């Protein structure tokens, strides 16, 4: 007898896999029916090419004849890269971040895993707000945290009162994402300040001050002149996790960073722990070439007006189909509500899964909200070519007609 994989890996196999499942099925359907018949809105893989400034910086990095550019470095990354990120975080979060407060990571996902590995003991709780990025639940599992889910406020806003309801002496951290995946909501300054107050009061009462973790790979993908408000300045015990996957369209290159609030009480212990976690999780350090390229080009960004156009094209189709949605303020996701079905649901099947299957029948692939802790709704990624959106019109209109009571 062999034990091919561990029990806990086995337990994770079927979980949170809706996004990849739809994406993989999409590839199969495209091979079968032709790519022009399948409209794949499943994965947040930006379709815009990286900005020219990034490509130039990358070429310069490749052409550099400086010795040792492909070697190991200090685990937290190059000092020049950390200094650039410190500038970025200081501007965005209105705090005095220095290079030493930053660790370069393997994407935002790497940053989140490094943070959780550092602050979580088994049985600790990680609070997230639903609907949430499905991978949060996998990351919590990996690090032995119990995922505790708070409800959102009206229109998927951040509601500190809802978070207050689920805080406990075991809460290690509250994790927020703004602009949000999957709703596109941008949290307001007032709501962030209210959350900071709730967490501070909880810390005084319970004797344990939770960390506030800010996952913001979409900070710069934001519409209609909005600016995402600072978070670190509102709450000292906070850490940012971010990346260039979305804003520079380089998710395959795996470059991100984390930054600890310079006002953290135990900053140096925390940074020592984070540095060790980055090493022992096997990342060792973030990709060297990407640190060079991004350090020289991080102020560039994808053309957000093109995502705004895609949003408007997509919402026009949803309006025509009569599908209700939350209008995104940032990121490139639309969260839509499944209509009431005319056919009775199969036992154990939720409305969002049934609607996803009905849309798939017509060639449109979207992800059920069940994977995001929010059954009844679904996520559309509109970071796809405009032609794909245009051509998907009848799939949404006809798919909805066939499904709706
Ligand atoms: N956090 C959120 C909310 C995301 O949507 C994603 C990717 O889709 C990540 C983190 C991971 O980003 P990265 O590719 O930089 O690891």
Image (cartoon, helix red, strand yellow):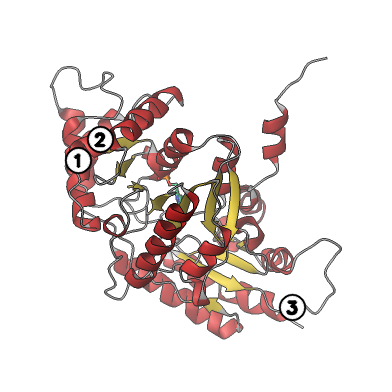
**Residue underneath mark 2:** 291
**Residue underneath mark 3:** 402
Label 1 or label 3, whichever comes before in sequence order: 1
Instruction: Tell me if 60 is positioned left or right of 148 in this view.
Output: left
Mark 1: is the Cβ under 8 angstroms from ligand 1? no
Residue at 44% across / 49% down in the picture?
A: 210
Instruction: Tell me if 199 is positioned left or right of 398 in this view.
Output: left
The Cα atoms of the two marked residues, 1 and 2, are separated by 6 Å
**Residue underneath mark 1:** 295
Q: Which of 25 and 123 is in front in this view?
A: 123
Against 36, residue 342 (above or below) is below
Q: Is mark 2 on a helix, strand or loop?
A: helix
Q: Nearer the viewer, residue 96 or 28?
A: 96
Task: Residue 331: name its quadrant.
Answer: bottom left
Asked whether the residues under the numbered discs 1 and 2 touch, taking CB atoms below 8 Å apart as contact, a structural biologist would say yes
Crowdedness near tag 3: few (<14), some (14–19) or many (≥20) residues, C-alpha within 10 Å: some
The Cα atoms of the two marked residues, 2 and 3, are separated by 50 Å
Against 124, residue 308 (above or below) is below
Against 358, residue 63 (above or below) is above
């Amino acid at each position: 007898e062999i034990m091919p994989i561990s029990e806990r890996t086995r337990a994770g196999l079927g979980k949170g896999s809706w996004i990849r499942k739809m994406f993989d099925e999409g590839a199969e359907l495209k091979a079968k029916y032709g790519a022009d018949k399948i409209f794949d809105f499943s994965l947040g893989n930006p379709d815009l090419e990286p900005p020219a400034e990034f490509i130039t910086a990358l070429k310069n990095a490749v052409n550099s004849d400086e010795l040792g550019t492909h070697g190991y470095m200090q685990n937290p990354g190059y000092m020049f890269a950390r200094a650039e990120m410190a500038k970025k975080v200081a501007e965005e979060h209105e705090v005095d971040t220095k290079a030493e407060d930053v660790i370069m990571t393997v994407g935002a996902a790497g940053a989140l895993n490094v943070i959780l590995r550092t602050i979580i003991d088994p049985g600790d709780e990680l609070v997230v707000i639903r609907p949430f990025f499905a991978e949060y639940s996998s990351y919590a599992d990996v690090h032995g945290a119990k995922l505790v889910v708070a409800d959102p406020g009206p229109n998927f806003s951040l509601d500190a009162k809802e978070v207050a309801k689920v805080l406990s002496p075991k809460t290690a951290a509250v994790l927020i994402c703004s602009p949000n995946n999957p709703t596109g909501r941008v949290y307001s300054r007032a709501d962030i300040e209210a959350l900071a107050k709730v967490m501070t009061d909880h810390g005084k009462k319970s004797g344990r001050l939770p960390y506030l973790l800010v996952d913001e790979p979409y900070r710069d993908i934001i519409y209609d002149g909005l600016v995402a408000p600072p978070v670190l300045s509102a709450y000292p015990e906070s850490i940012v996790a971010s990346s260039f996957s979305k804003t520079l369209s380089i998710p395959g290159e795996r470059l991100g960073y984390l930054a600890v609030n310079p006002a953290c009480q135990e900053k140096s212990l925390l940074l020592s722990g984070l540095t060790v976690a980055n090493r022992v999780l096997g990342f060792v350090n973030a990709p060297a070439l990407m640190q060079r390229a991004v350090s020289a080009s991080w102020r560039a960004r994808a053309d957000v007006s093109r995502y705004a156009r895609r949003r408007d094209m997509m919402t026009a189709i949803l309006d025509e189909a009569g599908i209700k949605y939350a209008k995104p303020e940032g990121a490139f996701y639309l969260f839509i509500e499944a209509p009431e079905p005319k056919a009775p649901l199969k036992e154990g099947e939720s409305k969002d899964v049934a609607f996803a299957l009905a849309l798939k029948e017509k060639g449109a692939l979207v992800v059920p909200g069940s994977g995001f802790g929010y059954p009844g709704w679904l996520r559309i990624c509109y970071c796809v070519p405009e032609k794909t959106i245009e051509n998907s019109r009848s799939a949404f209109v006809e798919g909805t007609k066939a499904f709706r009571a």
